[in-house]
Image (cartoon, rainbow, N blue to C red):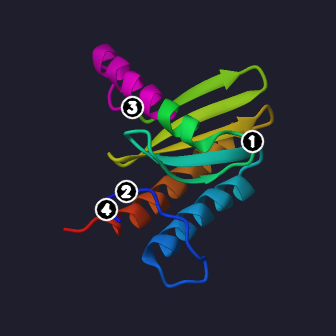
């Protein structure tokens, strides 16, 4: 597996490093959902829009990954033009929930879907640790 390449499906009982990494990443996404009321789904992708892993039941993870990449790219350009500093996150408040896109280092994105009852304060408190944990697992995949 190359840097940030999507893990291939395999036997979860195997000693395959790809499977182990995918399991670690999925566990982090699941833990975020369990710690923050209102988080319903999440997708981890590359900045190029390729799916890495997802904790999702109703959204199409590949589509969310691609759209998150486009969203973050445009939002970074807006932040640069407005001269308001580095982009931290993009929040879309919708009719019945939220979609939040966060940068995970320079090479990955975390997209979180929350329902109307999303606890924003808990999300802001818990998401930095989740992003850091995701970045650590992904960094271990990079061959130097």
Residue count near mark 4 (Cα–Cα under 10 Å), binned few <14, some 14–19, many ≥20: few
Give the quadrant of residue 117. Answer: top right
Q: Disc number at residue 2?
A: 4
- Sequence-wise, the earlier of marks 1 and 4 is 4
Dot 2 or dot 1, earlier in sequence: 2
Residue pointed to by mark 1: 58
Q: Are marks 4 and 3 in contact (CB under 8 Å)?
A: no
Overall secondary structure of the magenta section: helix
**Mark 4 or 3, nearer chain start:** 4
Residue lying at 51% horizontally and 75% vertically, measured from the top left: 20
Q: Earlier in the sequence, mark 2 or mark 3?
A: 2
Q: For mark 3, what is the residue?
A: 87
Regarding mark 1 in the picture, which secondary structure is present there?
A: loop
Q: CA distance from mark 2 to mark 1?
A: 24 Å
Label 1 and label 4: CA atoms lie apart by 29 Å
Q: Which residue is mark 2?
A: 4
| Residue 77, above or below 45 | above
Callout 1 environment at 10 Å: few (<14), some (14 to 19), or many (20+)?
Answer: few
Q: Nearer the viewer, residue 41 or 49?
A: 49
Q: Position of residue 12 (x, y in %)?
A: 60, 77
Quadrant in which residue 93 is drawn: top right
Magenta-highlighted residues: 68-86
**Image coordinates for residue 62, horizontal then vertical, percent:** 55, 41
Residue 16 placed where, x, y %? 47, 79
């Amino acid at each position: 597996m190359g840097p940030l390449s999507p893990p291939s499906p395999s036997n979860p009982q195997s000693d395959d490093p790809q499977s182990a990494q995918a399991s670690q990443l999925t566990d982090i996404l699941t833990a975020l959902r369990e710690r923050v009321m209102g988080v319903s789904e999440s997708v981890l992708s590359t900045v190029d829009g390729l799916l890495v892993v997802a904790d999702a039941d109703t959204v199409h993870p590949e589509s969310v990954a691609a759209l998150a990449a486009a969203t973050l790219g445009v939002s970074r350009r807006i932040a640069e033009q407005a001269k308001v500093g580095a982009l931290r996150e993009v929040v879309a408040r919708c009719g019945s929930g939220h979609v939040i896109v966060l940068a995970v280092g320079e090479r990955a994105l975390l997209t979180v879907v929350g329902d109307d009852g999303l606890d924003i304060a808990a999300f802001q408190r818990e998401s930095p640790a989740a992003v850091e944990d995701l970045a650590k697992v992904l960094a271990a995949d990079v061959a130097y």
